[in-house]
Amino acid sequence: MTMLRHGSTLIECKSGYGLVTDDEIKLLRVLQRVKKEVPVDIVMNLLAAHSVPVGYTSEEATQMIINEMIPKAIALKEQGELDIELIDISSLRFLEFPNPRLLRIRHLQRRPDRTH
């Protein structure tokens, strides 16, 4: 509420600390609930690949992000359950670039201008 008192009219929130699909979706659902309860605009973003989850190799994490996390987030957006504005893959520090597998994200998302 301090932000509101100081005149903020928009808040950008990113997930990213769940690291695995179910936890990322849980964080986004919490943000979705908050979005309905506070008198300020909230922009929600999926921060995929904040780091490699414990127990995963970078290859396994990449596959999970491409084959599970992003498609699930997009499906929930299309079903009207999540109001995601952006899928952020800019923090993929653990991958070698260029990585052609990540180009699939642009196709899956169907909004190439909103992936960075």
Image (cartoon, rainbow, N blue to C red):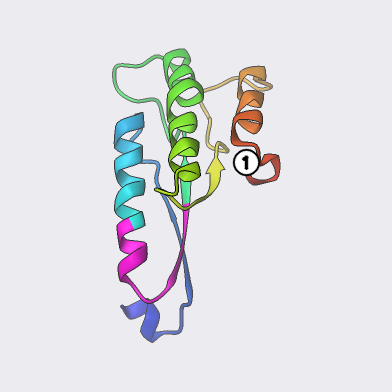
Q: Residue at x 48, y 77 (%)?
A: 9
Q: Which residue in the structure is indicated by mark 1? A: 115
Corner quadrant of residue 56:
top left
* Front in this rendered view, residue 7 or 109: 109
The local secondary structure at tag 1 comes to: loop
Residue 42 lies, in percent from the top left, at: 44, 64
Total numbered badges shown on the rendered structure: 1
* Front in this rendered view, residue 97 or 36: 36
Q: Is residue 109 magenta?
A: no
- Local crowd at mark 1 within 10 Å, few (<14), some, or many (≥20)? some
Quadrant location, the N terminus: bottom left
Task: Name the kind of residue labelled 1 in the image.
Answer: Thr
Residue 41 lies, in percent from the top left, at: 46, 70
25 relative to 96 in the view: left or right: left
Q: Residue at x 39, y 46 (%)?
A: 15
23 relative to 15 in the view: left or right: left
Q: Which segment is the magenta one?
A: 33-44
Q: Residue at x 35, y 39 (%)?
A: 25
Quadrant location, the C terminus: top right
Q: Is residue 111 above or below residue 104?
A: below
Corner quadrant of residue 107:
top right
Q: Residue at x 65, y 37 (%)?
A: 110
Residue 35 lies, in percent from the top left, at: 37, 63
